[in-house]
Amino acid sequence: MQGAIIPVLRADFGTSQWKLGLVAPAGTIGFLIFAAGVGAVAGRYDTRTLLLLGIVGTGIGVFVMGLIPSFGFFLVALILRGAFSGIGRGSDRPLLSHLYPHRRGRLFGYYDMMWAVGATLGPLAVTIALWAGNWRFAYYALGASFLPVVILIWYLPNPSVDGGDDPLTLAELRRISRNPAVLVMAAGILFSTGVEGGLFTWLTTYAEGRLPKSLVTVSLSVLLVAYIPGRFAAGSLSERFGYIPLTFGLGGLCLLSAVYTFMLASGLTVLVGVFCLGLSLSGLYPTLMAYATESTPEHSAPINAIGLVVSSCSIAGVPAAMGFVIDGTNIVWAMRLLFIPLAGLLIVSAIAWVRIG
């Protein structure tokens, strides 16, 4: 809901553009620290307990975000919510990796597809709450929706996993950090999630004045709804084409879509470009994560943590930098800066394809 709520926060609290750029960093500071911590202690603590703690805390944090009296308190609530989200997200993908060791690419794609379903509903929830008269209703409803998930985790039996993550040592950490597949993953995720962060935060701002007012928040939903077929396709195609060729192809399509959207499209055709952006951008993160995890499956949690930390930094940093660009020039030039990380992604994937295979 973050991108959709930005214009509302600006109107309600009179917040400047550069301060709104702090929303993304605030949401990722706690997330980054605790996701990294979970990766470091994997194999030593019960995954069920970590998941329960993360989901309970996230639900409470989301509900509290609807109670905030000022923009400053909103940032504090984001930090706390992010911390608990880091605990949950640091635990779930490694568990999936061990449950389906021979189908990681497909299942990682499907897992992130479900993220896309939820992310698509977020802006719609804000729109419905605004129609009902108060944006805070969206946070109350989302916070309450965590309750059935908590009940499921509490009552369902523990999953049966053969093996699991080995406890992480300093020597193993050094080995992981030198793994070429992990380095490619980190660089690819840095570029691709930076683009995601920029779009999630500033797309609705870009849409203002270019689309009818009723379609401004819907533009973000168009981006996110494209993630659903995009990630389903990426999960299926990864087994047919391989991780790196698929990454290169998706990166090329994403760059072309970005050029069309922010240089050529106008009016309702902007939504066509936005959909193509989401369709191609969506498959990059799960594909890169599966690529690195396949290389060191006994340390799924640390690799997951590396991916989450890198993506958190990129998702936080790029929108903040774009906020300063918007203050200095305008939103158009800020969106066109996204061409740079997409070109970097193509270079990294091309080098990996040639040098690593």
Image (cartoon, helix red, strand yellow):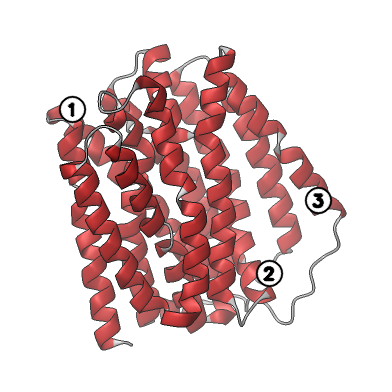
Relative image position of residue 65 (x, y in whole percent)? 57, 26
Q: Residue at x 70, y 65 (%)?
A: 45
Disc 3 + disc 1, Cβ < 8 Å: no
Using the numbered discs, state the Cα–Cα distance from disc 3 to disc 1 in whole angstroms: 46 Å
Q: Amino acid at mark 1?
A: Asp
Residue picked out by circle 1 = 327
Residue that extends furthest to the left in the rendered view of this protein: 329
Q: Position of residue 274 (x, y in %)?
A: 34, 45
Q: CA distance from mark 1 to mark 2?
A: 47 Å
Q: Nearer the viewer, residue 1 or 311?
A: 1
Q: Can residue 338 be seen?
A: no
Tag 1 near tag 2, CB within 8 Å = no
Q: Please tell me which residue is depicted at 67% across the width and 37% down the height of the picture.
A: 59
Q: Is residue 227 visible?
A: yes
Q: Which mark is residue 276?
A: none
Which of the marked residues, 3 or 1, is nearer the chain's N terminus? 3
Circle 3 residue: 152
At label 1, counting other C-alpha atoms closer than 10 Å, the crowd grade (few under 14, some 14-19, many 20 or more) is few
